[in-house]
Image (cartoon, rainbow, N blue to C red):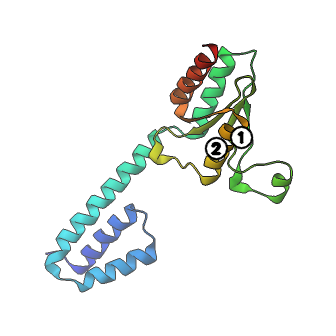
Amino acid sequence: MISDNVFRAELDASLKKQKILKKERNEFISLAMCGEISERDALLEKEDLKARKYQEKVKESKRIPLEDAEQIELVQWFRDNYSDKVIMLINNDDNRVQTKNILMGLHRGASDLFIPHLHLFVEMKRLKPKDSVWSEYQQKFKKYVEEVCGDTYILGYGFEDAKEKILKHIDSMIE
């Protein structure tokens, strides 16, 4: 059996590893202190396991390249292989939407890239679909591009996926 102070310290350390705020940690520890002493070991084991899983998840997500890095690689590949064609960024950073940007033509949900001669809009996402968010605005923009404009819209999960979909689109235009 461990002392109250050791129990508090170990439980706090496990909760801290899970990025739980201090106030919430203190509330959780207070509740745990009210429980049976015999349950403390099991609780510590359970929270320590949660902490290890959380830290593994964080490590894994850091190994996945950021969307920006994948997009830069795609643009470089396209320019290297199709130097006479244009691929351009559509400034769609709606994380910092300001009235002026909207008045200047910013459209929430617009794709990341446009390749005019292919009539192709490209939305880039991180490699793992579960780590990417495809917003309602982006889904509406895709529908507009395809149904109203008759253009093509691809959703690329990382450089390789986007490159493969662009090549497939080019092949379909040749046939």
Q: From this view, report whether residue 110 is shown above or below residue 103.
A: above
Which residue lies at the image location 48% right of the left edge and 47% below the top edge?
Answer: 131
| Residue 141, x across and y down, in percent | 67, 45
| Residue 104, x across and y down, in percent | 86, 49
Q: Secondary structure at mark 2?
A: helix
The reply to whether residue 57 is visible in this rendering is yes
Residue corresponding to mark 1: 148
The quadrant holding residue 39 is: bottom left
Q: Amino acid at mark 1?
A: Val
Q: Secondary structure at mark 1?
A: helix
Residue 143's mark? 2
Which residue lies at the image location 20% right of the left edge and 78% below the top edge?
Answer: 3
Marks 1 and 2: CB-CB under 8 Å? yes
Name of the residue lying farthest toward the bottom: 34
Q: 29 and 99: which one is in front? A: 99
| Residue 43, x across and y down, in percent | 22, 70
The quadrant holding residue 116 is: top right
Residues packed near mark 1 inside 10 Å, few (<14), some (14 to 19) or many (20 plus): few
Q: Amino acid at mark 2?
A: Lys
Which residue lies at the image location 36% right of the left edge and 56% below the top edge?
Answer: 54
| Residue 11, x across and y down, in percent | 30, 70
Q: From this view, report whether residue 89 is shown above or below residue 170.
A: below
Q: From this view, report whether residue 107 is shown above or below residue 165.
A: below
Q: CA distance from mark 1 to mark 2?
A: 8 Å
Q: From this view, report whether residue 161 is shown above or below residue 139.
A: above
The quadrant holding residue 13 is: bottom left
Residue 26's mark? none
The reply to whether residue 112 is visible in this rendering is no
Residues packed near mark 2 inside 10 Å, few (<14), some (14 to 19) or many (20 plus): some
Image quarter (top left, top right, bottom left or bottom right) of the N terminus: bottom left
Sooner in the amino-acid sequence: mark 1 or mark 2: 2
